[in-house]
Image: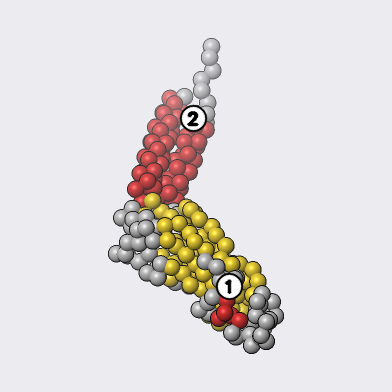
Amino acid sequence: MQPSPRPGRPRVPVLLLLCAAALLLGSAAREWGGYRRIASLPVRADGSPARGPRLKSAARYAYQVRLMGALRGTYNGATYAAASVTDIQGQSVPHNALEVEPPQLVEAPSMGTGRRVFLVPPGTDLDGREVTARLLPERFVSEMYLPEGAQAGAVAGELRLEVWERDAVRQTALAGLLGGLSLLCLGAGAAAWSRGARAARQG
């Protein structure tokens, strides 16, 4: 005679289905609002421009242009981040030695002294415009009061330019698919739980 199924056995696939539903739902949420990095380039202290990709139509794509990292003053020991300069006493002040294009990009609220984020403003389409970032080292050097010939190499290191992209059409479709699969797993888990409960009552 076959033993009757244990009331607790159906709970294992139920838990697996519920976990899958939660994971799929989380993936859908991340896909819906997430950005993916499409470029990461050095912004060098010599003033040469870092040239990123060309932006695409705002009807489908959204962008974040991120700048991070730090340079070091060879003679004064100061730290030059994307948004500010910090002296050896730890005092920080903003600087204007970083040039970002297209000029229509607007800076997001402060991300701290070590990072800056620029966005395409609503209603602006920069389709085909190239993202570039360039340091203006002469603005740093002018504050050091160095003798002639000592200005070269007064600032060392590099910042980092990253361009992040969100494809609204592709990511919305994928988020919808993941959300639908999440609902299927949730429904299957609920059905399995109901069957297990009936089996337990009958047992």
The disc, 2 or 1, on the residue closer to the chain's N-terminal end is: 2
Residue 2 drawn at (x, y percent): 53, 14
Q: Dot 1 corresponds to which residue? A: 81
For discs 2 and 1, the disc positioned in front in the rendered view? 1
Residue 158 drawn at (x, y percent): 61, 67
Q: Determine the residue positioned at 40% across, 67% down.
A: 102
Q: Amino acid at mark 2?
A: Pro
Residue 138 drawn at (x, y percent): 57, 79
Residue 71 drawn at (x, y percent): 62, 71
Q: Is residue 126 above or below residue 197?
A: below
Q: Is residue 5 above or below residue 75?
A: above
Q: Quadrant of residue 78?
A: bottom right
Is residue 72 in view from this perspective? no
The local crowd at label 1, few if under 14, some if 14 to 19, many if 20 or more residues have their Cα within 10 Å, is: many
Find the distance from the CA under tag 2 to the CA under tag 1.
Answer: 57 Å
**Dot 1 lies on which element?**
strand
